Amino acid sequence: MRRSICLGVLTLAGVFATIAVNDARQDRAALTAHRVADNLFMLANAPSVQGMGGGGNTAIFVMANGVALVDTKIKGYGQDILGGVRELTDKPITTIINTHTHWDHTGSNAEFPDTVDIVVHENTAANLRSDDCDDGAGFQGGSIKNCDSFKGDNARFLPDRTFSDTMTLFGGADQIDLFYFGRGHTDGDTFVVFREARTMHTGDMFARKGLPYLDVASSNGSATEFGKTLEKAAAGISGVDTVIPGHNPTPLTWQDFVDYGGFYNDVVMKTAQGKAAGRTVDQIIASYSVPGQFSDFVAADDRLRTTVQYLYDGQ
């Protein structure tokens, strides 16, 4: 109960600024900042923005000697993020943590000083550095193809530090813990926990209350492991009340995250049962309905078909 009440107060009271859209760039989405804790904010697309908007949610964490960001949206939003930071503090941005490879979470990395320390999971770093890197921009209709943001002179914006399973950054009230629990949305998804704020940024391992986009083709994501990774995260992370999701326009709760695992794994179970009974993918989809206990989650037709097909094929 404490978690849901706390989040409601923070969400209602915390919307403190909307960053104006540049009149000359009508494709730019307005961004809204939500106060999650005294020194932690979520910079998201305004609730009225449909579709991708500016990209994934950015966390702004104001520390004693600088600012840490989690994810930098799509290309062109560096100044918008900086504007959000300057509404809060004059401290320099010292650290960027990217939850995974995709263009809508790493797109503006190169728009910050190359002195900023960039931290990612080792699989994400390997993908960004590879000659055939695919950050998903082409699939999503983006203008940046195959990690172009990190090629040539921009290679200086590739990650500075990586980790395998866990990493702790800073200490005391500024402590940030990074966790990797396995494949899911990609093969390098990082869960970012702000200890003092009792808050976790999930990236697209929990984008919103709906079935995920699974980047099996480009970033070694896995439908079969996605649910297991969620379960490991729920069991392996403690002391979290509030969740900054990958794309949802407002923060969510820890219980929402736990329920998301139950929602997804229900699809896994029903697909396995249907396949064992000799049903086709079409038959499994036709018989599926969202369980009542997860009625606030959405199984869009296209995501349901893709997820069931991957699970059916063991991918």
Image (spheres, rainbow, N blue to C red):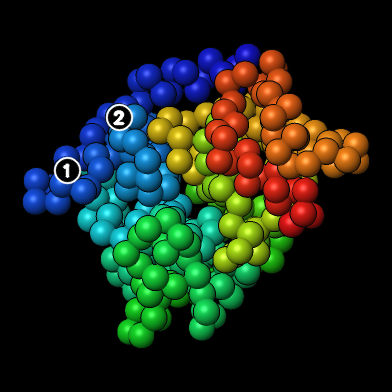
What residue do we see at 55% from left, 33% from top?
A: 300
Which quarter of the figure has residue 33?
top left
- Quarter of the N terminus within the rendering: top right
Q: Is 251 on the left-hand or right-hand side of 214?
A: left
Residue 21 tag number: 1
Q: Amino acid at mark 2?
A: Ser
Residue 255 at x, y = what percent? 65, 26
Query: To which residue does mark 2 refer?
Result: 48
Residue 116 at x, y = what percent? 38, 68
Q: Is residue 228 above or below residue 127?
A: above
Which is nearer the N-term, disc 2 or disc 1? 1
Disc 2 from disc 1: Cα separation: 13 Å
> Element under label 1?
loop
Q: Could one spot residue 173 in this view of the protein?
A: no
Q: Is 163 on the left-hand or right-hand side of 147?
A: right
Mark 2 surroundings: few (<14), some (14-19) or many (≥20) residues within 10 A: few
Relative depth, front residue between 293 and 59: 293
